């Protein structure tokens, strides 16, 4: 079972990619999508000149655009999503292989992120495996997501470039949209409590308050992405329902409503990106 690790990196981030690589193995390849904003960042480390590594450079910004570029180039049966600051171990790849080999009906798996010694757990994880649905699932990080490439392409699923770092309005949340699209398409998505990648326990998203502007805008955009025009009355209903809590938090209910509406309007104003395949 061939695995492709899709690495998204920007500018000097390419210098960190060699630290991701494991010793060559027949069942593993790396596709590195390197976004460059200036010609001075085009130099690729010589150590990446390996038969199992492919580096492709594109111009511009946008994390989802970068991931979609790598996704378009993927050829493996199983896809692991990566950033340039992660680490892998041989046993992590074996965990992925085993999970998909034992369950031929598994389309998408969400695993766990390990942290370096001395760091706290990356997040609070459930101890049992379970099938995700729209009502029951924890917040998924991109680095946890692994999927069968043919099933994702068959359903025409890719990353929505209106979300994520480098997008016009929403600096995060692309993984939530991706998982929503998988579930909506009828794919079988399962949480598996095994580690498959290591990353420091640092998260900008977790440090943002619940009712900060970025969260409110994302909520409006995500609702519009899921429910269409119903996101607009939902924003009003949500504001009324949360009014006392918003006041206690120190957030103006009017500002909260405006921010959710701004996020919803953004989805209607900005056209979705074409499929990368």
Image: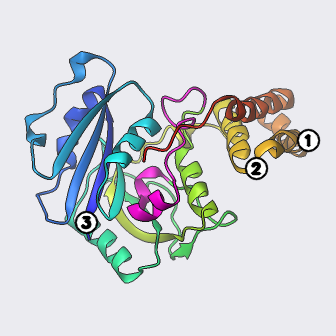
Q: Find the distance from the CA under tag 2 to the CA under tag 3.
A: 37 Å
- Image check: 221 left or right of 100? right
Please give the name of the residue rendered at 13% of the width and 33% of the height, measured from the top-left corner: 45
Q: Is residue 148 visible?
A: no
- Image check: 90 left or right of 98? left
Q: Position of residue 183 (x, y in %)?
A: 60, 63
Earlier along the polypeptide chain: callout 3 or callout 1? 3
In the displayed structure, 226 sits above or below 40; it is below
Mark 3 lies on residue: 2
> Mark 1 or 2, which is nearer the eye?
2
Tell me if residue 158 is in the magenta stretch. yes
- Image check: 60 left or right of 175? left
Mark 1 lies on residue: 240
Q: Position of residue 207 (x, y in %)?
A: 55, 39
Q: Quadrant of residue 259?
A: top right
Secondary element under disc 2, as helix, strand or loop, is: helix
- Callout 3: 10 Å neighbours few (<14), some, many (20+)? few
Mark 2 lies on residue: 227
**Mark carried by residue 251:** none
Please give the name of the residue rendered at 14% of the width and 65% of the height, measured from the top-left corner: 26
In the displayed structure, 85 sits above or below 253; it is below
Secondary element under disc 1, as helix, strand or loop, is: helix
Tell me if residue 72 is in the magenta stretch. no
Earlier along the polypeptide chain: callout 1 or callout 2? 2
Q: Which residues are magenta?
A: 141-169
């Amino acid at each position: 079972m061939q695995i492709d690790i899709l690495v998204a990196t920007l500018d000097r981030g390419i210098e960190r990619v060699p630290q991701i690589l494991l010793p060559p193995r027949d069942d593993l390849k790396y596709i590195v999508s390197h976004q460059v904003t200036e010609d001075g960042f085009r130099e690729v480390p010589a150590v990446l000149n390996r038969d199992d590594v492919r580096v492709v450079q594109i111009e511009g910004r946008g994390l989802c655009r970068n991931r979609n570029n790598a996704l378009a180039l993927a050829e493996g049966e199983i896809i692991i999503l990566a950033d340039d600051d992660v680490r892998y171990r041989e046993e992590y790849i074996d965990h992925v292989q085993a999970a998909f080999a034992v369950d031929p009906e598994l389309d998408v798996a969400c695993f766990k992120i390990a942290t370096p010694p001395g760091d706290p757990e990356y997040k609070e994880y459930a101890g049992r495996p379970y099938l995700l649905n729209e009502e029951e699932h924890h917040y998924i990080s991109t680095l946890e997501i692994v999927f069968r490439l043919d099933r994702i392409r068959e359903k025409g699923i890719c990353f929505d470039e209106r979300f994520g770092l480098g997008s016009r309005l929403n600096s995060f949340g692309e993984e939530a949209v991706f998982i929503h699209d998988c579930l909506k398409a009828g794919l079988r998505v399962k949480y598996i409590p095994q580690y498959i990648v290591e990353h420091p326990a640092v998260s900008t998203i977790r440090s943002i308050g619940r009712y900060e502007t970025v969260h409110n805008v994302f909520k409006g955009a995500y609702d519009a992405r899921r429910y269409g025009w119903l996101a607009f009355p939902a924003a009003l209903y949500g504001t009324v329902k949360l009014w006392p809590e918003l006041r206690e938090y120190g957030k103006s209910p009017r500002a909260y409503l405006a921010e959710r509406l701004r996020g919803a309007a953004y989805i209607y104003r900005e056209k979705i990106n074409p499929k990368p395949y």
